Image (cartoon, coloured by chain):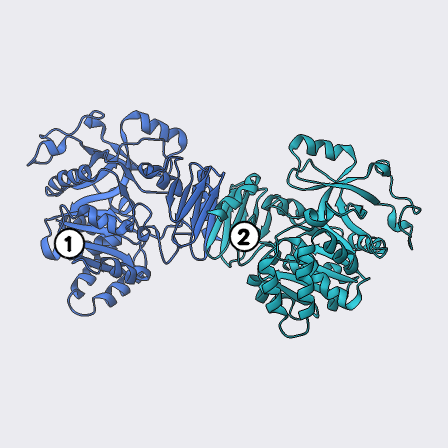
Chain colours: A cyan, B blue
C-alpha cells in the first residue's frame, strides 16, 4: 500500500506562527512534532516508509527534506500549487510504476486524528474496498453545524444510515470492514447555517475530510476520463521519470495545467460509484487557534490554560499561549485569549475571534 | 540655583520593561525620552546645566553618563543605595562648596509633570522661601483617596486652606509667591482607605511628592542635628573632594552609614519649621502601567488605545501596548489589557491588575 501526503497548503489561519514560508503542516501545534511528521508517523503501522510520497511546493522542499530526510520516504516537488487533482495525479504516477493495483491513501498533511488505532482500522477497511477498483473517501460524523466544510451525502438507496450489504457491487474479503461503508450520493459545497443544522441532525450527511483511498490505476483512469488535459500532462511527466529531466518536465507541465480540486474535477463528475466510510476517530482539520485549543484539552493546566512555551500565569484562565521564542511570557488576570509569540510578530486575540486572524496575514 | 536629581531607584512595577539594570527613570514611558532626561529638561528654564547633579547607583552610572554625557551636568555615583537622606546630603556637599545659600531643588528622576510652566513657577516661589533658610516641600492636592502615598498635614494654625500671611516667620520678596504656601504640621505615613478618603475631602492633607527645596546650608545643618553619624561621614567625603580619592571615600563611607529617608530622618524629627506649597501642576509618580495609561490620554487612538510600538489593532479598545522591540504586535478583539514586549519577556495583563505586576519581577 502507498500513502500520498499532500503538504502543499499555505494556511494563514495560524498567523503569526504560520507564514508563507512556514504553513500549518510544518508547525508543531498539535504536539511537539510538526503536523507533517505526525501525519507520517500516524500511518507507519500500515505503510512502509519507502511507500510514502509527500507532495510539497517548491518553497517548502528544503524544509520537507530536512524534516523527512532521515526516513526512506519520498518527496515530490510541485513548482506551483495547482490544487489537489494534479497533486494526486502526479503522485499516482510513481505508485502506478510500482504497483498500480495497490491501495493509495491520500492524506492532507495538516489534519489531527485523536484515535489513531481506529483511524488505522478504517484505512485498512477502506483499502479492501479500494482494491475492488472503487474510489473511497472518509466522511466524518458531524458534531456541530459547521459551515466551513464541504459535506458528503449518503445515497438514499442505502436507507439512511444502514450500511452497504456484502451483496452490493463489490466483493468483500472482510464483511466487518463494511459496516460503516455507504454509497456516496453527491458531494455538497459549504452550506449555510440553517442547512448545516439540517445536515447535522438529518443523519445523511458527513463532513468531507479530504482523505481518499483508491488505487493508482483507478484514479489515473478517472483523471483520464474527467480531466483529459491533466492526464496528457501527467503522461508526459511519466515518460520523463528516471530519464534525468523529471523535475524540468514537472515544472513545464505544471505551468500549463489547470488548478482544480479532486473533489470538483473527479468526484463530482465521475460516473463511477464512490464509497464513504462513516468515521468517528476524532478528526479535526485544526482550522483555527480556537480549534487547536479545544482539541488539546487533555493538556490544560488547572485553570484550563493550554500553555505551549515558557509561561507563568497568575489568575488567568482559558488561554492558549503558543510560543516559538525563548521569551518568558507572563499572564496576569487575563481570560479567553490566544497569544502567539514569534520572533517578528506577536498576536493577542480574543480566542473566539480566531477565524479573523487571517486579516493580519492579508495585511 | 542647583538641582539634585535622585535617580537611584530600582522599581519593578514596570516589569518587564523595568529591570534591575533598567529601572523606571531610564525608560521612555512618558514620552520618547527617558524619564531622567524629561526631569533634566523640565528644569532647564531655571537651572543651568552645570548646576545639575544627578545621583545614581553604581549599576546605572554608565547608562546615566551615556544619557547625560552631552550636557554639562554632573553625575554622582553611590556605591549602594542608602535611601534619600545620604543621597541628598552627598549632593549638598557639592552645592555647599559653590554657594551654600543657593536654593537646591531635590527632584526624583521618575515623576511626571503635566503643566511644566506651573511647576517652574512653583519652584521659583519655593526657592524664595528656601532662601530664608527654610525647608520647603511640594504637596499635591489629592484627586483620589490614594493609599499608596505618604501625606503632608497642614498646620491647623493656618486655618485650613488659608495660606501663610506675609507677616508669618519669613520675610518675603514676593508676596504672590506665598499664596499657596502653608506650614507643615506633620508628615503622615500611607493611610488606610477610610483615612485616605477623609484626607481627600478634609482639605488639610496633601500628597507628599518627595520634591524638596532648601539651601545646602540648611539641609546639611539639619542633617548634622538629626543624623550626626551621617553628617560625620559626609564631612569625611567633603574633605576628599578634589583630592583624587573622592569616589573611594564615598564608597568607604557608604558601607558604614545607615539607610534612611530624608522624610523619616530629617523632616519628621527637625524642630525647624517646614513649609509646603499646595500644588496642582498635574503631578504623577507614574506608579503603574495603569497610571501611565491614564496620564497619556491625549495620545489615545480612536478606541482609547495607547499604542507605543508597531501595533495593529482590530476591534480592540482601552489597551496599553508598550514595546521596545521591533516586533509587530497584532491585537484582535481585546480590551483593557496592558501588553509589554521586551527582548526576553512579554507581559499580558488586565490593566486593572497593574499593581500586581511586581509579582513576576519578584519571581
Observer-nearest of A301 and A199: A199
Observer-nearest of B317 and A232: A232
Residue A336 coordinates in the image, percent (x, y): 56, 40
Residue at 21% in and 69% down:
B245
Residue at figure coordinates x 40%, y 31% from the top left: B193
* Residue B281 image position (x, y, % from top left): 23, 36
Label 1, residues with CA under 10 Å away: few <14, some 14-19, many ≥20 = some
Same chain for labels 1 and 2? Say yes or no.
no
Give the secondary structure at mark 1. helix
Across and down, in percent, residue B204 comes to 27, 28
Choose top left, top right, bottom left or bottom right for residue A66. bottom right
Q: Which residue is mark 1?
A: B49
| Left or right relative to B184: residue A343 | right
Q: Are marks 1 and 2 in contact (CB under 8 Å)?
A: no
Q: Is residue A233 above or below residue B278?
A: below
Subunit ID for the residue under disc 2: A
Residue that numbered label 2 is attached to: A311
**Nearest to the observer: residue B294 or residue B250:** B294
**How far separated are the C-alphas under marks 1 and 2?**
46 Å
Of A213 and A200, the residue lying toward us: A213
User: Considering the numbered disc 2 on the image, is that residue within a helix, a strand or a loop?
Assistant: strand
Q: Is residue A67 above or below residue A156?
A: below
Quarter of the image for residue A184 reads top right
Q: Is residue A108 visible?
A: no
Direction from residue B357 to residue A281 in the image, left or right: right
Say which quadrant the N terminus of chain A sits in: bottom right
Q: Position of residue B179 (x, y in %)?
A: 15, 30
Q: Which mark is residue B298?
A: none
Chain of the residue under label 1: B
Amino acid at each position: 500500500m502507498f500513502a500520498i501526503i499532500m503538504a502543499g497548503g499555505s494556511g494563514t489561519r495560524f498567523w503569526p506562527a504560520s507564514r508563507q514560508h512556514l504553513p500549518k503542516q510544518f508547525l508543531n501545534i498539535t504536539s511537539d512534532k510538526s503536523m507533517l511528521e505526525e501525519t507520517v508517523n500516524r500511518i507507519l503501522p500500515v505503510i512502509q516508509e519507502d511507500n510514502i510520497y509527500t507532495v510539497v511546493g517548491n518553497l517548502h522542499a528544503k524544509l520537507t527534506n530536512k524534516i523527512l530526510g532521515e526516513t526512506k520516504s519520498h518527496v515530490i516537488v510541485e513548482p506551483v500549487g495547482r490544487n489537489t487533482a494534479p497533486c494526486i495525479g502526479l503522485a499516482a504516477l510513481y505508485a502506478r510504476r510500482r504497483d498500480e493495483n495497490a491501495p493509495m491513501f491520500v492524506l492532507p498533511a495538516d489534519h489531527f486524528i485523536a484515535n489513531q488505532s481506529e483511524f488505522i482500522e478504517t484505512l485498512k477497511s477502506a483499502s479492501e474496498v479500494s482494491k475492488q477498483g472503487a474510489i473511497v473517501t472518509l466522511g466524518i460524523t458531524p458534531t456541530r453545524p459547521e459551515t466551513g466544510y464541504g459535506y458528503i451525502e449518503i445515497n438514499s438507496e442505502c436507507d439512511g444510515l444502514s450500511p452497504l450489504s456484502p451483496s452490493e457491487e463489490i466483493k468483500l474479503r472482510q464483511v466487518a470492514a463494511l459496516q460503516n461503508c455507504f454509497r456516496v450520493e453527491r458531494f455538497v459545497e459549504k452550506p449555510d447555517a440553517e442547512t448545516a443544522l439540517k445536515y447535522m441532525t438529518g443523519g445523511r450527511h458527513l463532513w468531507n475530510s479530504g482523505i481518499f483511498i483508491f488505487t493508482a490505476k483507478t484514479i489515473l483512469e478517472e483523471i483520464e476520463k474527467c480531466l483529459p488535459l491533466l492526464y496528457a500532462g501527467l503522461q508526459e511527466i511519466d515518460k520523463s521519470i528516471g530519464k534525468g529531466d523529471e523535475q524540468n518536465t514537472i515544472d513545464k507541465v505544471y505551468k500549463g495545467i489547470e488548478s482544480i480540486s479532486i473533489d470538483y474535477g473527479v468526484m463530482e463528475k465521475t460516473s463511477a460509484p464512490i464509497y464513504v466510510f462513516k468515521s468517528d476517530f476524532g478528526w479535526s482539520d485544526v482550522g483555527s487557534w480556537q480549534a487547536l485549543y479545544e482539541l488539546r484539552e487533555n493538556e490544560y493546566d488547572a485553570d484550563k490554560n493550554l500553555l505551549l512555551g515558557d509561561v507563568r500565569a497568575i489568575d488567568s484562565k482559558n488561554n492558549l499561549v503558543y510560543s516559538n521564542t525563548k521569551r518568558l511570557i507572563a499572564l496576569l488576570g487575563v481570560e479567553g485569549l490566544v497569544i502567539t509569540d514569534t520572533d517578528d510578530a506577536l498576536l493577542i486575540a480574543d480566542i473566539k475571534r480566531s477565524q479573523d486572524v487571517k486579516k493580519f496575514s492579508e495585511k
